[in-house]
Amino acid sequence: LRTEADLRLATDRHQLTLFYQPIVRLSDQSIAGFEALIRWQHPERGLISPADFVPLAEDTGLILQIGRWAMQEAAEQLAHWQRTHDSGLFMSVNVSGRQMLDDDMVECVRHVLADTGIAPDTLKLEITESLLMDDPGRAVSMMQQIRSLGVHLSLDDFGTGYSSLSYLHRYPVNSLKIDRAFISGAGNGDRREEIPRIILLLAKSLDLDVVAEGIENPSEVTFLRGLECRYGQGYYFSRPIPAPDAERLLALPA
Ligand code: G
Ligand code: G
Ligand code: MN
Ligand code: NA
């Protein structure tokens, strides 16, 4: 199982699905948007995590087809929730390096925007620092083309990649997601808190928005609010959940 043929069948048989994890405003814990996270709903094996098939999808090139589907599906869902719940809601979609550097990427984003009618700045593409390593020139060019459509770019897992902080000002990104490794345990008063503190200072001086990932307890929330971190995401607020469950969260009174 989990060969290229399996994955092809999975896409043909519509076994791939998106879960949604809320991204909240830390000021009042209201839902500002969602991150779409792909899952393989296997008929016998149940839910398969992207960690177990995205690498294969990348190696085989199937990620291009899967990634296009995920972006379209997430944008359609967003358009629906903007109409029914909150017109300012945003959607973050993970984009792999291979997909970001593909010739058809910009056209694909343009098509998704035209097809769904969502405001471009309510779509955020999450990219990782490793993408920027392979072919930095092309990566920056692709990022600029996507930004020129009005779509936002977010640097995922920030702080864990190889790219040095000194290059950050050259990347046309709108926001940073602080990796959960730096959030875990923050608020206990030990030295590791200095990392999110410095990332938030840096983001402020570069005028970038920040999402803290992997928030699991209230002391992390208090700590991050104290640093004026705008957004948070993590099991403390909600796990990634199927669309109907996300819709129930959206319908709860503020
Ligand atoms: O949801 P989970 O934490 O198991 O996700 C594991 C990894 O899979 C994360 O690194 C996430 O960025 C990645 N991932 C989730 N959905 C997608 C997707 O649609 N496309 C790509 N390229 N990666 C995804
Ligand atoms: O690489 P990326 O940041 O896109 O991966 C997101 C992954 O983190 C998803 O697989 C998601 O399930 C997971 N995740 C989200 N919130 C938490 C959390 O609070 N704790 C932990 N351990 N994982 C989380
Ligand atoms: Mn992500
Ligand atoms: Na992330």
Image: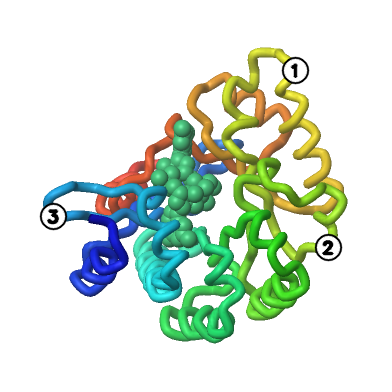
Percent of width and height locating residue 218: 52, 22
Q: Amino acid at mark 1?
A: Arg
Query: Could you tell me which secondary element the residue under label 1 belongs to?
Result: helix
The residue drawn where x is 61% and y is 71% is: 151
The circle on residue 170 is: 2
> Eyeballing the image, is 115 above or below 40?
below
Q: Visible in this render: residue 31? A: no
Compare residues 182 and 86 and report the one nearer the observer: 182
The residue drawn where x is 52% and y is 43% is: 24
Q: Visible in this render: residue 68? A: yes
Q: Amino acid at mark 3?
A: Pro
Q: Earlier in the sequence, mark 1 or mark 3?
A: 3
The circle on residue 5 is: none
Percent of width and height locating residue 114: 48, 85
The residue drawn where x is 65% and y is 55% is: 130
Q: Amino acid at mark 2?
A: Arg
Query: Could you tell me which secondary element the residue under label 2 belongs to?
Result: helix
Which of the two discs, 1 and 3, sits closer to the camera? 3
Horizontal side, residue 75 vs residue 205: left or right:
left
- Label 1 sits on residue: 191
Which quadrant is home to the N terminus? bottom left
**Which of the 4 image quadrants contains residue 103?**
bottom right
**Which of the 4 image quadrants contains residue 190?**
top right
Horizontal side, residue 58 vs residue 190: left or right:
left
Percent of width and height locating residue 113: 50, 80
Q: Could you classify mark 1 by the number of other residues whose Cα lies within 10 Å: few (under 14), some (14-19), or many (20 or more)?
A: few
- Label 3 sits on residue: 43
- Tell me how far mark 3 sits from mark 2, CA to CA: 45 Å
Query: Could you tell me which secondary element the residue under label 3 belongs to?
Result: loop
Compare residues 95 and 224 and report the one nearer the observer: 95
Percent of width and height locating residue 34: 46, 53
Compare residues 150 and 193 and report the one nearer the observer: 193
